[in-house]
Image: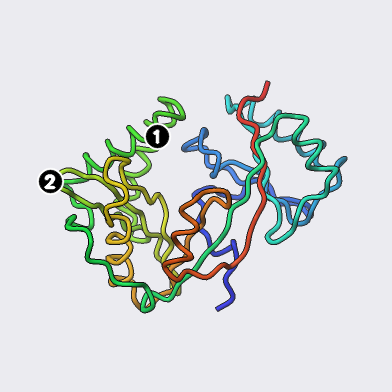
Amino acid sequence: MNLTFSNIYNPGIIEKDTNDFTHVAFIEVPEMYDGNFIKWKEIPTLEKLKQVENYMKEMHLARGQKHVKFVFPQDEKLPDELVAYLTEQHYDMGILEMYAIDPKTFPSNDRSSAQIQFISEETLQAYGDIHYEEAKQWGESYALSKREMLKKDYRDQRKQQIIALVDGEIVGSVDIIVRDQTAEIDNFFVLTAFQRQGIGSQIQQFVMQHYAEKTIILVADGEDTPKDMYVKQGYRFIGFQYNALKADIE
């Protein structure tokens, strides 16, 4: 199976498609950077980037959105000229890395005694609340929108939501986007106070057991430490993708 970033789920829809770029929009949650962005089909010239930047600014400001985000082609490094301009304009530069694993090769884990289960009507509210609290660091409006989005996702058969409980309290969760050949790990987190106790590995073990016939995929921040954990667990590197975000446009 030839895996690429095109296998990664995105909630947005294509609003505009040209020879140079695709404009992805998720108006339901306008503050979601990962749902509202420009995806380049090839590395643009500086002149082309500036033209599309102006288009994106006008579009987003008209909608009350305050950010511009660019996603660049997979496995291509950015020319120094683009990096210099984006840095000068105060964009935050980032890199995402994609990983995959055969569930049958995932190492067993018996360190944690957390209870792992799919969410239910009884746990849905608490699940939404814990994500709301986690998302408030990016603003009240975004946190509220995300909580409502996750409640809607509960009714979507393509998405499965899994929680970890300790003494009846939710301490971690993960969402799984299910497709014909893949199951994608998304929104994966464990509360800080419960990290390094094996709970994250136990959640993954649950995923591996329930989607044993699929390839498990995920995207990790290329500059973050969790990616090192994935490598140790047997995930294989698929590719990288640069992005640039300016979160406060005028």
Q: State the residue at coordinates (44%, 59%).
A: 229
Element assignment for label 2 = loop
Q: State the residue at coordinates (72%, 51%).
A: 40
Disc number for residue 232? none
Q: Is residue 58 left or right of residue 127?
A: right
For the N terminus, which image quadrant?
bottom right
Residue type at tag 1: Ala
Residue at which label 1 appears: 135
Q: Is residue 27 left or right of residue 108?
A: right
Disc number for residue 168? 2
Q: Quadrant of residue 184?
A: bottom left
Q: Quadrant of residue 233?
A: bottom left
Residue 124 position in % (x across, y down): 22, 45
Q: Disc 2 versus disc 1: distance between alpha carbons? A: 22 Å
Q: From the viewer's perspective, is the residue at label 2 or at label 1 nearer?
A: 2
Residue 130 position in % (x across, y down): 28, 38
Indicate which disc, 2 or 1, sits on the residue closer to the N terminus. Answer: 1
Residue 127 position in % (x across, y down): 26, 43
